[in-house]
Image: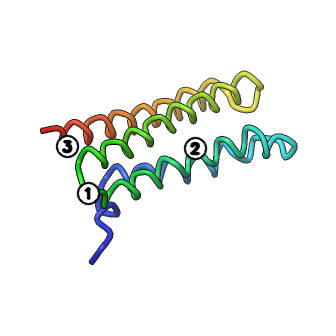
Amino acid sequence: MGFRFREWQIYKDARKFRREVIKQIFPKIPKEERFEIGSQLKRALDSVVLNIAEGAYRKTDKDLAHFLNQSETSLNEIVSCFDICYDDGRIGKNELDEFSAKAENLVSQLIGFSKTLQK
């Protein structure tokens, strides 16, 4: 038995997004803030990926849709973290826009996936 979620594009894209944020945004957060906004950002990034995987083997499509929604709400949290990083001068407008657009793309994928489950 394989892990079907590993075949899903949304899972692959969520993992890639997580890696990019950790590589490009996380290092810009000062060490003294890593337990605050940094920790919050990291947990939310992990949550997106983990909820997709956790929902993959639920008994019903409704249960899977619940976990996809959890991933979506974590993406909202991530974008809020980006806003805070921007407001605090940790990232620039280009990074804010670029990573917010990537998050929005993932939200669109999650919504689309959830809609296919409702059919």
Q: Secondary structure at mark 1?
A: loop
Residue 35 figure quarter: top right
Q: Amino acid at mark 2?
A: Ala
Q: Which mark is residue 117?
A: 3
Q: Which mark is residue 59?
A: 1
Q: Residue at x 31, y 61 (%)?
A: 57
Frontmost residue, 3 versus 85: 3
Residue 2 figure quarter: bottom left
Q: Secondary structure at mark 2?
A: helix
Which tag is nearer the camera, tag 2 or tag 1? Answer: 1
Q: Name the residue at the right extreme.
A: 32
Q: Residue at label 2?
A: 44
Give the tally of numbered discs: 3
Which tag is nearer the camera, tag 1 or tag 3? Answer: 1
Q: Amino acid at mark 1?
A: Lys
Estimate the x, y position of residue 59 in percent, counting from the top left: 26, 57
Mark found first going from the N terminus, 1 or 3? 1
Q: Are marks 2 and 3 in contact (CB under 8 Å)?
A: no
| Label 3 crowd (10 A; few <14 / some 14-19 / many >=20) | few
Estimate the x, y position of residue 84 in percent, counting from the top left: 69, 26
Q: Secondary structure at mark 3?
A: helix
Q: Is residue 69 left or right of residue 73?
A: left
Q: Residue at x 73, y 47 (%)?
A: 27
Q: Is residue 65 above or below residue 9?
A: above
